[in-house]
Image (cartoon, rainbow, N blue to C red):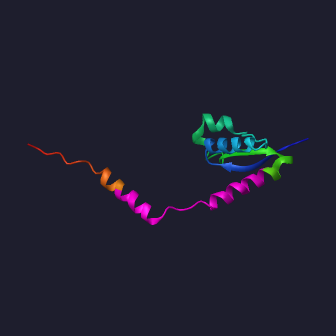
Amino acid sequence: MASLVTIRTYPTYSEAMVARSFFEAHGVFAVIPDWYHASNAWHLTTALQGVRLCTIDSEVVDACKLLDTVRSTKSKQQRLPLSEVILAAAVYLFAGIPHPVRRR
């Protein structure tokens, strides 16, 4: 008989749902057994040690391979050039300052 194996634990229900839909889009069965507590008593997810994402024990290898591909693409993300960061900070500073009001 197949049993559920916890693949990963997420801090929020929304992150677990995104991961579940990612797995199901790739043909791996995934279920969130803590969905009821996470959606109705979301403030207790820390006490329950997060939201578990589980799969059948026969699909654990496929799920781990998918998690490894996500981690490898995350590490390949490029950083913004320094000039773009400075430009964004300048726009934020100058656009965020309210216009002074003249008194008569």
Whole-percent x, y for residue 102 in the image: 14, 45
Identify which residue, 102 or 87, lies in the foreground.
Answer: 87
Residue 85 sits in quarter: bottom left
Q: Left or right? Give the position of 79 relative to 72.
A: left
Magenta-drawn stretch, dominant element (helix, strand or loop): helix
Q: Residue at x 68, y 45 (%)?
A: 19
**Which region shows up in magenta?**
63-90
Q: Position of residue 42 (x, y in %)?
A: 59, 39
Q: Quadrant of the N terminus?
A: top right
Q: Quadrant of the rendered structure where residue 71 is?
A: bottom right
State yes or no: residue 86 in magenta: yes
Q: Is residue 67 left or right of residue 2?
A: left
What residue occupies the far left of the structure in this picture? 104
Residue 84: x, y in percent? 43, 61
Residue appearing at x 75%, y 50% in the figure: 7
Quarter holding the C terminus is: top left
